[in-house]
Image: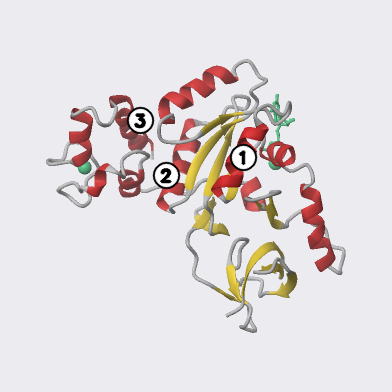
Amino acid sequence: MKTGVIVSHFGVKVLVEDTHGVRMPFHVARKSGHVVGDFVDLDEPRLKRLPRRNELSRKVHVKTQVIAANLDALGIVTSVIPKTPRKFIDLVVVGALSQNIRPFIVVNKSDEAETTQYYEELCAAFGEDISIFKVSAKKGNHIAELFEFLKKVGRTAFVGVSGAGKSSLVNALLPDAHLSIGLIDAANQHGQHMTTVSTLLKLPGAGELIDTPGIRDFEPVDVLPAQLAHYFLGFEEFLQDPCKFRNCLHLNEPECTIIQAVKSGKIKKERYQNYVQMLQNL
Ligand SMILES: Nc1nc2c(ncn2[C@@H]2O[C@H](COP(=O)(O)OP(=O)(O)O)[C@@H](O)[C@H]2O)c(=O)[nH]1
Ligand SMILES: [Mg+2]
Ligand SMILES: [Zn+2]
């Protein structure tokens, strides 16, 4: 079977890269459901999608929309001005873990004085379980460090609230990003506007960045209490030895693995309190 990966998507056209790195345009139905990152069977006339390892979804009103597939990592771009709400970060972390995608945090705007305290708060909340970078897209501070990380983790997308600095960060990491996007131009004979294009950008050397309109306007999907109980950061390793009740929310149920781990100090009290608070806020 000859396979390829969708590297860009606009309207009814997709650009597919085969295993040799050759890119070809194809037509797909408007509601085909193909997204950037999807593997496809090139032997099939209709560009059949292959099963996905995971999906990145966002919330649109009450619905869920898949915006990319087969990710390795999800970077949560945050800033103190405007301040990224803690709830946004919490929901994205749980959503990523539930899809087996590695979440990490980028605290942008390190050139702003208030950033240090914000960064320290996030380190206190997540520090041991998640990578946290403090960068300035504007000044270029620690961008090289983040770049090295991205090369190692594989295929990444950045999400964040509007104004956190996603676009600035992509530009800082990939000043030539518009060149990769230019490749789409070649496939588009009609000279249409390119503003709604979804793209998989290659980092020099290794690693990939996904940029889609869905990411530019990202709202995390809802998380159910049962999902949180299972995918709260730091719980999973303990839950290898499950709680007595399958639907345990780790509050005051008997024979609860998590409550036992908190009592024995294996899970920090503050972490557990974060969990209870988040559960109440869902
Ligand atoms: N001070 C400061 N401002 C930044 C930094 N990165 C981005 N900005 C500014 O934050 C605003 C939003 O940036 P943008 O990249 O458009 O955010 P997006 O909405 O997440 O894509 C713009 O005015 C940027 O100039 C940074 O590192 N430091
Ligand atoms: Mg933007
Ligand atoms: Zn439990």
Type of the residue with mark 2: Val
Identify the mark nearer the N-term, 2 or 3: 2
Q: Residue at x 65, y 65 (%)?
A: 6
In the image, residue 35 sits, relative to residue 195, either above or below, namely below
Q: Position of residue 159 (x, y in %)?
A: 59, 43
Residue 94's disc is: 2
| Quadrant in which the C terminus appears | top left
Q: Is residue 161 left or right of residue 187?
A: left
Q: Nearer the viewer, mark 1 or mark 3?
A: 1
- Whether the residues at callouts 1 and 3 have beta carbons within 8 Å, the answer is no
- Whether the residues at callouts 2 and 3 have beta carbons within 8 Å, the answer is no
Q: Which residue is mark 3?
A: 274
Type of the residue with mark 3: Asn
Type of the residue with mark 1: Glu
Q: Is residue 242 left or right of residue 23?
A: left
Identify the mark nearer the N-term, 1 or 2: 2
Q: Position of residue 221 (x, y in %)?
A: 48, 49
Q: Which residue occupies the extreme top position in the image? A: 113
Q: Which residue is mark 1?
A: 148
Q: Residue at x 53, y 72 (%)?
A: 50
Q: Nearer the viewer, mark 1 or mark 2?
A: 1
In the image, residue 152 sits, relative to residue 66, either above or below, namely above
| Quadrant in which the N terminus appears | bottom right
Q: Is mark 3 within 8 Å of ligand 3?
A: no
Q: Could you say whether the residue bearing mark 1 is in a helix, strand or loop?
A: helix
Q: Is residue 222 visible?
A: no
